[in-house]
Amino acid sequence: MNLAIRGIEANLGDHADDSFHRDLHPDLRADFILANPPFNLDDWFSDALRDDVRWRFGLPPAGNGNYAWVQHFIHHLAPNGVAGFVLANGSLSSKTSGEGEIRRRLVEANLVDCIVAMPEKLFFNTGIPVCLWFVAKNRANGRFRDRRGEVLFIDARKLGTMESRTLRVMSPEDTARVAGTYHAWRNATADPVYADVPGFCRSAKIEEIASHDFVLTPGRYVGAAGSRRRRRTDRREDRAPDGRVGRLSSTRVAAWRSGSGRTSGSSGTTKRGAVVTVDAVRYCPVNLLPVGHAGNGLRRVFHFLATS
């Protein structure tokens, strides 16, 4: 239904299944992946997954599926593929059960291209802020400039306007500012040329990220108009447990298991321009998502970033 109401055609396969335990399209290698997986999933693991080929960067903790999803997406990327996905803020700084070590390996493998901190209150059902991850399988493929050895951090927490007391909306101008910043940084011949903007964006070298113990919270890197209060807020976000998101995810997964919320895709090989979307515990090959059907500001941001 999520695809249908946006006018997107897709082959969803003939039955629903578990993305981790029974990958219905193991041979799929996508050029683009857009994903909104369940945050902090605490019941994803079983011993059958312990030696899974997808855990190239480390075994994710059994009590949290965030880095299982990250590695699942990377596994399904084509050699020059790009993935954009939404995760809980805790994924940027958690060191629980080896998550920090997995994050270090991802950065050192030159997979992490851009991290965006989003504002709070973008969702109807929860007010918590989230982050956007963008990973690229080959950051020196000749299509754009060679970005190896650096990561772009964007702090978009101040963007958007309050449409109601509980809902913030990203305008097309907000989306264009974030996407334009990323495109200018990524492209060797961008006009205007990329420049760091204190408090909003900064390109950081891996050596600096290592000095922060591979914590990827944008506020640590972009700086902020000399505000001590802002730095304390960034530290609190580093420690945020995201418990509300976990409870929300459990509810969504329960609905899926009852048959009301999930379908799964079919197997296939790489197609030029193919996009894989992931919502809750599903993913499916779909046609390139048209901008006019990109939904709210959050979808527009990571669609533009990942596929433009």
Image: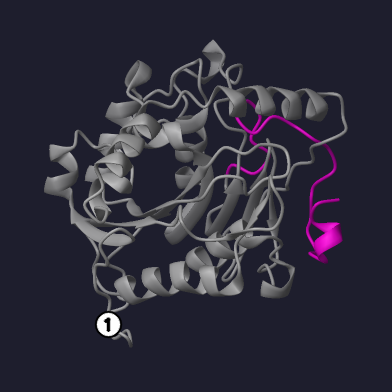
Instruction: Tally the numbered discs.
Output: 1
Q: Amino acid at mark 1?
A: Val
**Residue range highlighted in magenta:** 1-26
Res. 143 visible in picture? no
Q: Answer above or below: position of 190 versus 60.
A: below
Res. 209 visible in picture? yes
Residue at x-position 62% and y-position 34%: 38
Q: Answer above or below: position of 184 versus 203.
A: below
**Mark 1 sits on what residue?**
193
* Residue 46 part of the magenta segment: no
Q: Pick whichever, 73 or 132, lies toward us.
A: 132
Residue at x-position 30% and y-position 40%: 229
- Is residue 90 found left or right of 270 in the rendered image? left
Residue at x-position 54% and y-position 26%: 40
Residue at x-position 45% and y-position 67%: 178
Q: Position of residue 92 (x, y in %)?
A: 37, 37
